[in-house]
Image (cartoon, rainbow, N blue to C red):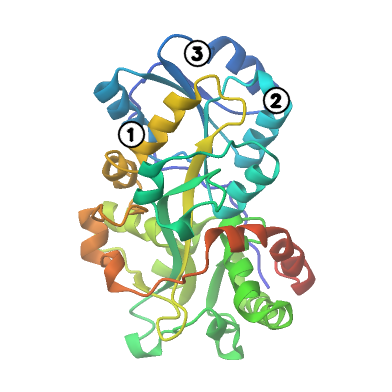
Amino acid sequence: MHHSSHPNDVPPPRRRRPIGRRVALGALAAAAALVATSCGGGGDTLVVYSGRHYNIEAAFEQYTEETGVELEFLTGNDAELREKLAVEGDETPADVYITVDAGNLAAAAEQGLFQPLESDVLQSAIPAELSDSEGRWYGLTLRARTIVYNPDLLAADEVPTTYEELAEPEWDGRLCMRNASNVYQQSLVASLIAHHGEDEALRIVRGWADNAEIFSNDVLILEAINDGLCEVGVTNHYYLGRELDENPEFNVALAWANQDDRGVHVNISGGGVTAAADKPDEAQAFLEWLATDGQEVLVAGNHEYPANPDVPADPLIATEFGTLDDFVRDPLEATVFGALNPDAIRLMDEAGYG
């Protein structure tokens, strides 16, 4: 098995527009000092901690324009933000915590970082399988983790159709996969555990480990496939959407996985009101906006699918990959595979998956 190293996911360069005051999270201790001086809140200001980096500025700016409520936000690593919230406790300035992946949302709920909400708006806008059963967090956007391939190297009828097939010996040396420390990959493995049980999931992940070159970034996987270094891989759909947005001739195609059985694995980004929020009602109103009127701007810059089924997919994604009605999604609830995250990490280690 070969390994390629690269920094963790870095959003593509883009012009930033100031919205109130923005603070980037680096080292945890430094962030604690920064947030004390730059995210004090007060008045009609909400403080948001966000592990979701892409295009949040546009959504936050629109909310301020529509409501007059200012938003101060801190972005950073999900685990560091959760630790920061836990350390701050009742003294946290954060009213809202937004993060990517059901595993991160489940961990935050387990740590008691969210408060349960009673919201008819959120319950009607977001399907139950994309939210916490106790109302502590709600999904806001969808990201499908599926099979991608080089159409010059594989004819459409040669492309593997399931995650399980990628473990077969015929894909040895032809496969690119994401590293074990990535939470998106962990959630995919957690879904395998939920569907197959640990023994079969272990067999599958061992097959991946035997076959794949491992990368630390979905973009690198796509570039390797485009360059013909790999024939097939697994990435989140929106990474390919971004590449095609920048270069329509990018030579990678997408195939929805497991369409003849359970459907493609779908993960979420989502959020909730912090347990110690100073402005819980205003924070809930902000989440309700993100789940309804704010859905289109929230997904547009990152090419995710909206979690609210009444909101259309952005035009590029709808054209290139189809709408949510055009493919079968795994109905496994996010709370289930989110809770299995520790088991997935342990299993990947046992499988020798790097």
> Which residue is label 2 attached to?
89
Left or right: residue 351 compared with residue 80: right
Where does residue 301 sit, x and y in percent of width and height? 31, 44
In this view, 19 is above or below 184: above
Question: Marks 2 and 3, how far apart in space?
Answer: 17 Å
> Which residue is label 1 attached to?
59
| Residue shown at 54% from the left, 70% from the top | 176
Mark 1 Cα within 10 Å, few/some/many (few <14, many 20+)? many
> Which residue is label 3 attached to?
41
The reply to whether residue 88 is in sight is yes
Amino acid type, label 1? Ala
| Residue shown at 36% from the left, 42% from the top | 121
Label 1 close to label 2 by CB (< 8 Å): no
Quadrant in which residue 1 is drawn: bottom right
Left or right: residue 126 compared with residue 210: left
Amino acid type, label 3? Gly
In this view, 77 is above or below 74: below
Most extreme residue toward the right, as rendered? 350
Residue 120, which numbered label? none
